[in-house]
Amino acid sequence: MEINRIATADTVFFWEGCSNHQLRFQKCDECGHVRWPASIICPKCHSMKTSYIVSEGEGEIYSFVIYHAVFNSNFKNKVPYVVAVVRLKEGPHLLTNIVDCDFAKLRCGRKVKVVWRKIGEVTVPCFQ
Ligand SMILES: [Zn+2]
């Protein structure tokens, strides 16, 4: 299974969530900080006690760029495409793609919502 090839012990909860169309982020059980990328220690309080939340999948475009060149063979039929950093309502910033959009309407601060796409054999969160 593809998830076993890309997931680590720290990120298996995230990839299992993606397979079930759930956007999951670690949450510190001590201070409540919601974080991404996953890590064994909370960057705020250094606790190793962690669980995860399921994000509502809503946020806003923090930054974006339109790729006109293929940097990954899984995207060879998708150029041009949008690579963006989305700031989720729960706090984490996620490097992702904005899909099915009018490039002329892209703006930082624009509200977006998660949609799920299969890239290669892996289901990943994208945004519209
Ligand atoms: Zn913490």
Image (spheres, grey):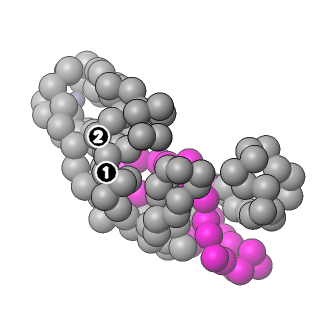
Residue at image position (52%, 63%) is 117
Compared with 55, 15 (above or below) is: above
57, 100: nearer the viewer: 100
Indicate whether residue 89 is drawn in magenta. Answer: yes
Q: In screen coordinates, is 25 left or right of 50?
A: right
Residue type, numbered disc 2: Phe
Total of numbered circles in the picture?
Answer: 2
Q: Is 115 above or below relative to 3? A: below
Residue type beneath disc 1 = Gly
Q: Secondary structure at mark 1?
A: helix
- What residue appears at the point 76 percent right and 79 percent down from the top-left corner? 104
Q: Could you say which quadrant of the image residue 75 lies in?
A: bottom right
The residue range painted magenta reads 84-110
Image quarter of residue 50: top left
* Dot 1 and dot 2 residues touching (CB under 8 Å): yes
Q: From this viewpoint, is residue 39 visible?
A: yes
Q: Which quadrant does ligand 1 occupy?
A: top left
Inspect this view and state whether residue 38 appears: no
Tell me, for residue 37, which label it has, or none: none
Q: Mark 1 highlights which residue?
A: 17
The residue pinned by badge 2 equals 13
Of residues 124 and 89, the one drawn nearer to the viewer in this rendering: 124
Describe residue 50's horizontal placement relative to residue 111 as left or right: left
Q: Quadrant of the N terminus?
A: top left
The residue shown at (38%, 53%) is 18
**Marks 1/2: CA distance?**
6 Å
Secondary structure at numbered mark 2 = helix
Q: Residues within 10 Å of mark 2 (few under 14, many from 20)?
A: some
Q: Position of residue 14 (x, y in %)?
A: 34, 43
